[in-house]
Amino acid sequence: MSADIASKSVILTVDDDPVTLNTIFEVLKEIYTVRPFTSGEGALKFLETNKVDLILLDHNMPNMTGIEILQILQDNPQTKDIPVVFLTSSVSNEDEIRALEIGAMDYLNKPVKARSLLTRVRLQLELQSHRNHLVELVNEKTEELQEANRKLEQRDKATLDLLAKASDMRDNETGAHIERVVLFAKVIVDDLLKSPKEHYIISEQYGQDIIATVKLHDLGKLAMPDNILLKPGKLTAAEYEIIKTHPLYGAKMLDQAIDNMGEDSLLKVALEIVYCHHEKWDGSGYPKGVKGFNIPLSARIAAIADVFDALTSARPYKKAWDPNDALKVIYADAEKHFDPYLCEVVKRHEQDFIDIVNMNNIVEELLTPETTDMSKVQLNHLATGKPNSHTLPVCSATNVVRAI
Ligand SMILES: [Fe+2]
Ligand SMILES: [Fe+2]
């Protein structure tokens, strides 16, 4: 321990015997700042507003014993980490063990010998300094890890958003459909979290995973042929059979992702939603025709959110429905298409559903060859014309060939 640290260290001593207190003071005062007290009450009062680095505590005192004071120090988060060395003339092994069990770091018998006192105090202060350093290191590393996790979560979210937009842009040009589906699902999830009901009790994590992945429900549309997916008229029976395979394509993509990544709650919830969002409560849905509670709750929520938005949105082949009419359709389909309890949840939050339909800030940039001159589209994050770390140093054919 450096002389500088030692001189700054504050030692609090508590002993009802003024002679002992004075001896300790005289031994330590050249190296440390010493704060002597003749009672526990006075010492505890001092500790309310002052920081100390070590406490030397007498065992036998008239009002409050050393053990009682130690217990109070241990129960207080502000003082529980201050090392305490017991001083006593009692030779009872029981007392020693009790004090050490409660949290004392060391034990010194009285009369205290100067050399022994100085050595024990120095050692305890050194140990405390190492402990503090370790705590600082752990806190630093924890913060770094939390920051890295935050970045990974943001990257996950950005990746999911990209995938969701890519799938949605196959047949919805604006991306607003998936944004609203997320909001509808969130209304239902929030209700389930706030009002737990048998068979519908969900963890915070499951709720968050649903909200984060419901936008991927039509991931499999990426695999659907344009001439069927974008056909303006009615589909033939054969074409409809092909469309009905989109949950399988999406599910296969996610299944492979889970193979590569290992168990992951987010991807598993995404898999449930993508595979089962067209299943119906009465078993008449696709791809498997599972019914009731056999359909994952996440997918039952996605089904309502998806259909409600499809009804209230304008599509090339239909006008947008009034939300009140769409709600009537949802309620009429309780126990047929939709989970009846989830329909009750929707009923409890009708106004939220209507408000989301009427929100006009979810209209995204329309990016299609018909509507946008892509050569004029502004990119905010692409640095062109400046050398950066990814640029080859010299752009000659020879170097390019070597680089390849
Ligand atoms: Fe779908
Ligand atoms: Fe959809």
Image (cartoon, rainbow, N blue to C red):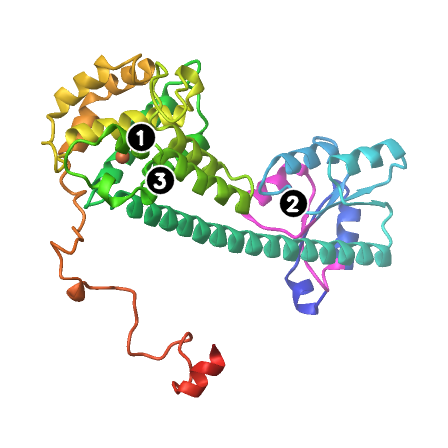
Front residue of this view, candidates 158 and 376: 376
Q: Quadrant of ligand 1?
A: top left
- Spatial CA distance of label 2 from label 3 is 57 Å
Could you tell me the amino acid type at mark 1? Glu
Over which residues does the magenta segment extend?
28-54
Query: Which residue matches tag 1?
Result: 241
Q: Residues within 10 Å of mark 2 (few under 14, many from 20)?
A: some
Residue 31 location, x and y as percent? 72, 64
How far is mark 1 from mark 2, CA to CA? 69 Å
Mark seen at residue 220 = 3
Give yes or no for residue 51 being in the magenta stretch: yes
Image x and y of residue 262, in percent: 56, 43
Mark in the foreground, 2 or 3: 3
Dividing the picture into quadrants, the one containing residue 341 is: top left
In the image, residue 384 sits, relative to residue 269, either above or below, namely: below
Kindly state the secondary structure of the residue where label 1 is placed. Answer: helix
- Closer to the camera: disc 1 or disc 2? 1
Q: Earlier in the sequence, mark 1 or mark 2?
A: 2
* Residue type of the residue flagged with mark 2: Asp
Task: Report the residue marked by disc 2.
Answer: 81
Residue nearest the viewer, comparing 88 with 392: 392
| Res 190 visible | no
Kindly tell me whether mark 3's CB lies below 8 Å from ligand 1: yes
Out of 17 and 388, give the one closest to the viewer.
Answer: 388
The quarter of the picture where residue 40 lies is top right
